[in-house]
Image (spheres, rainbow, N blue to C red):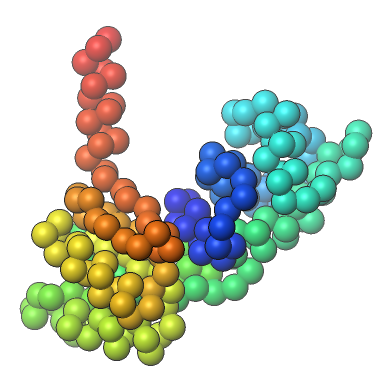
Amino acid sequence: MLIIFILFTLKNGETLSPSTTIERLPIYYRSLQKLDKKNVEVISSKELGERIGIPSTQVRKDLSYYGEFGRRGVGYEVPVLLKHLRKILGLNQDWEIVLVGAGHLGHALVNYGGFRKLGLNINYVLDADSKKIGEEFGDVEISNVENLTEVVKESGAEMGIIAAPAEYAQGIADELIEAGVKAIWNFAPTHIKVPHEIELRNEDLSIGLISLAYHLSRK
């Protein structure tokens, strides 16, 4: 759900609430979706907090940044709160996304059905490998990365995903930004620099496993 954090900051520009609150919004949204599917109409802050693992006071504080959605002594109407969060998170519209890097990780991202259900459409995949260009990548045909600028401008994509080798990540990021992308989700295992107005999220998958290995080794 980290991609939704990017959408929120992209949709709203400056974020007035703490980043920890913003990162919890997708968790609220996902929990409310499950409740809505079960036809649960009302939930208290205590019950919602228990589902997420945080105090009810934190739930009320988080949601109060964006309005008064609950009723004292009653709780939150699930469909209503879900609708408000969908708008707050920028999920009330479809987003075109450009992915650079047609490797195993890129394939997994394209084929993850949960993104499309949220209106997050990875409809453009580009790669530098001539053997891959023209092949089907899920439901998307792989294009030449040399056409990156053209693809971004024609699609109107405001978000780019980098799943390419580290040595190419900065150049790809620069070209995405130059073409008009305003937010980048970077999976390349390297630090990239972007202007302050560009939203950037770095995902180093090895760090998570290293952290787990560290904690296990200490036991």
Instruction: State left or right for residue 3 relative to residue 62.
Output: left
**Which residue is depicted at the point 38% across and 89% down?**
154
- Which of the pair 163/10 is nearer the observer? 10
Where residue 93 appears, x then y in whole percent?
59, 73
Instruction: State left or right for residue 208 relative to residue 183.
Output: left
Classify residue 176 by image quadrant: bottom left
Q: Is residue 98 visible?
A: yes
Where residue 182 appears, x then y in whole percent?
42, 69
Classify residue 167 by image quadrant: bottom left
Quadrant containing the C terminus in the rendered view: top left
Toward the top, the furthest residue is 219
Where residue 25 appears, x then y in whole percent?
60, 47
Residue 6 lies, with reference to residue 53, above or below; the image says below
**Which residue is depicted at the point 29% across and 35% down?**
208
Classify residue 179 by image quadrant: bottom left
**Which residue is depicted at the point 22% across and 86% down?**
147
Where residue 96 appears, x then y in whole percent?
44, 76
**Which residue is depicted at the point 67% across and 26% down?**
55
Instruction: State left or right for residue 206 relative to residue 151.
Output: left
Q: Is residue 42 visible?
A: no
Q: How many numbered markers are drawn?
A: 0
- Which of the pair 61/13 is nearer the observer? 13
